[in-house]
Image: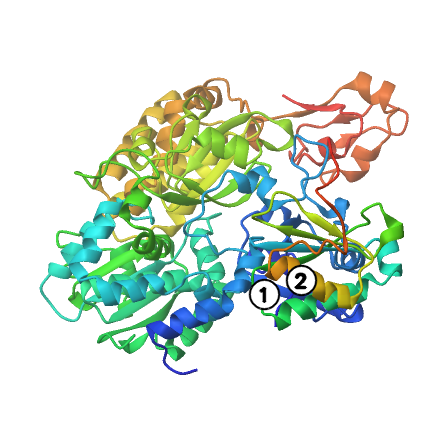
Amino acid sequence: MPKITIEDLARIREQTRHLTTLRQGAGRVKITVHMGTCGIAAGARDIMSAVMKEVEQRALHDVIVTNSGCAGLCSQEPMITVEVASEPAPVKYVRMTPQKVRTVIESHVVNGRVATEHALAVGSEKTR
Amino acid sequence: MAYRTYLMVCAGTGCVANQSMKIKDRLEAEIQKRGLEKEVAVVTTGCNGFCAVGPIMVVQPDGIFYQLLKDTDIPYLVEEHLLKGRPVKELLYTPPAEKSPVPRMSDIPFFADQTLIVLRNRGLIDPEKIDEAIARGAYQALAKVLTTMKPEDVIREIKASGLRGRGGGGFPTGIKWETCRHAPGEPKYLICNADEGDPGAFMDRSTIESDPHAVIEGMCIGAYAIGSSEGYIYIRNEYPIALERLAVALKQAREYNLLGKNIFDQGFDFDIKVVRGAGAFVCGESTALMASIEGRTGEPRAKYVHTVERGLHDKPSCLNNVETWANVPQIILNGAGWFAAIGTGDVSSDPWGGSKGTKVFSLCGKVNNTGLIEVPMGITLRKIIFDIGGGIRDGKKFKAVQTGGPSGGFIPESLLDLPVDYEELTKVGSMMGSGGMVVTDENNCMVDMAKYFLAFTQAESCGKCVPCREGTKRMLDILEKITNGEGTEEDLFLLEDISNMVVESSLCALGGSAPNPVLTTLKYFREEYEAHVKEKKCPAHACKKLITYFINPEICLEKGHGCDVCRKNCPDGAITGQTKQVHAIDVMKCGRCGICQDICKFDAIYIE
């Protein structure tokens, strides 16, 4: 490793910052892939791979990708949920394919427009 | 490479001792097996602090906290959590008072009530990768200092922050730096005291293990302020993991030229040497430590001339503790005002006017949540013990807490609302010390506790000056006599007399504070001493010579039907009786080991 300057310090920080941002659970967007038995059977693994690939290719360092269990609507799997920190409620997308994943990420995550053609609903179920 | 999930496996000394490296290997193997190696990364971090429930793993970004892991749990955990997204409930943490587990780290009271400055990177970075530390802001403060601040500005900032020595003395850091800067003589030396000798204390070890660059950066900033180019870290050889991580961190910092010549091209040179100590308690004392670095016997000297003027090799030397150094970068980055807003008192006109920032404590003894905590100054002892510490183990009653290591005083229940503050703790006969905190319950005999800690300081007394060498020995003799039931009331007065003499006439702080446990227990728990000398009884049933074990014949026969288990397990052959008959203990043969009481399922055995 060569000697570093103050500019290098800022560069290293910028390049690695996403690592620790994600580890603190602080991201701008959180994409949840629903991976219950139903989701996995319907192809959620490929959806997860597609999400990971898209996030990496677009270098989206502020996006958290995580998985969770069945969302209850097994007939519409594979599903993903997109939560943007600045938006009031999460959006669920249904019947995902790798192609649809790319559309959703480009439209919703990057450009901030909900991809209505693939969306099921805005908001979460009521819990108590 | 970006990952969706990071498994932050604690690799502090405590968790490593509980096989966390095995957990890590198993995780990596399982992840490989499931084809998740491109999505999930395993990261080893420094100590998480919650050592009581180790080995620990935190899943990020979800913040799910797993505890008490075994390598056999891993296949199921990987399948459930990482493949199916369902946290494994059985492996989550459940607070003592509650029934359902708490999955999120930020919701666990142990973590929620802490304020992290020194330990801000614990569990978040791999301490052996400098880039991860830089991602969290390491060396930004050094860049700021070298490009925008004069040494005088740095000293002014540290003075205004109210930072005081975290090694125990509580001397205002800024004043120490200023005196050292203006002391005549070249070169000037900078020293980091990592010779943490208190039994049960591991603040410094943990800080170095989880974030070595914070200490290195703090030292660089100090060196610039004082005008030094040569630094030392004096660390005990019993800390193998800390030593290794420190060596890696120093090497990486040198490769980046964050240590060396012409750092950041600003014409500032500084490098650090590691000196390993052999583990003598007295070498935590500044003059003894410096003697040890020079290769001489680790003995303190009288400080008519302070070490900031004539210290190591008779040159001006500035010594601060690990925790003090680790605070420095954050003060520079966030400003003195930010730091001074945390804590007690007012330091704007008087640097001794308050206790500012946070303090790291190692919480141990009879609390539920033993571990390493960082709390804001001014927090009450009650909050530390009952909220963060989760109260006393097994529903027992709190008796006293010892703060400040083996030479700290015991603080009783009536003073638990005392804020953590240098002056307040000194006022009640204890001290901040380096941050050991030992909690005792109703089963601890205070005379016995005082004896235990005095035995430690007595053995560690270097023997240079008579009051400490001979005085502590005589004190220990008296305590031995009292716990054996041979003490008299005069002994209590003699004990107090010798204690005060040792405090007043010892050369260094070892002797000056060693009698604290004795003096405070005499003050707050005098009735326990009196029971020992007058009635020859130990109220806590801890002093073996003063207790007798008995078997309640009714319970033994009616509930236990003379089960005979106690007789079979008695190592002294002191129990007589046979199956279906009443058993009895021969007090002359009984060795007071207590095995029979532990083993009796019917609680037939009692102490008088």
User: Which element type, helix, strand or loop, lies under badge 2?
Assistant: helix
Q: Is residue A63 visible?
A: yes
Q: Could you tell me which secondary element the residue under label 1 belongs to? A: loop
Q: Position of residue A36 (x, y in %)?
A: 83, 53
Question: For the point 60% across and 61% down, which residue is it?
Answer: A110
Q: CA distance from mark 2 to mark 1?
A: 10 Å
Asked whether B250 or B279 is in front, the reply is B250
The quadrant in which the C terminus of chain B is found is: top right
CB within 8 Å, label 2 to label 1: yes
Residue annotated with mark 2? A105
Tell me what residue is drawn at x 40 percent, y 79 percent. Answer: B255
Q: Is any part of residue B302 visible from this angle?
A: no
Quarter-wise, where is residue A101 in the image? Answer: bottom right
Q: Amino acid at mark 1?
A: Leu
Question: Is B435 rendered above or below residue A76?
Answer: above
> Could you classify mark 1 by the number of other residues whose Cα lies within 10 Å: few (under 14), some (14-19), or many (20 or more)?
some
Work out whether residue B272 or residue A123 is closer to the camera in this orientation and state it: A123
Q: Which residue is mark 1?
A: A60
The image position of residue B25, as x and y in percent, is 70, 67
What's the chain of the residue with tag 1?
A: A
- Foreground: B309 or B131? B131
Which residue is found at the position 43% from the left and 72% from the top? A11
Identity of the residue drawn at 28% across and 30% down: B497
Where does residue B496 sit, x and y in percent of width and height? 31, 29
User: In the current view of this chain or complex, which residue is farthest to the front?
Assistant: A117
Q: Is residue A38 left or right of residue B357?
A: right
Residue B264: image location, x then y, percent: 29, 74
Q: Look at label 2 and name its amino acid.
A: Ile
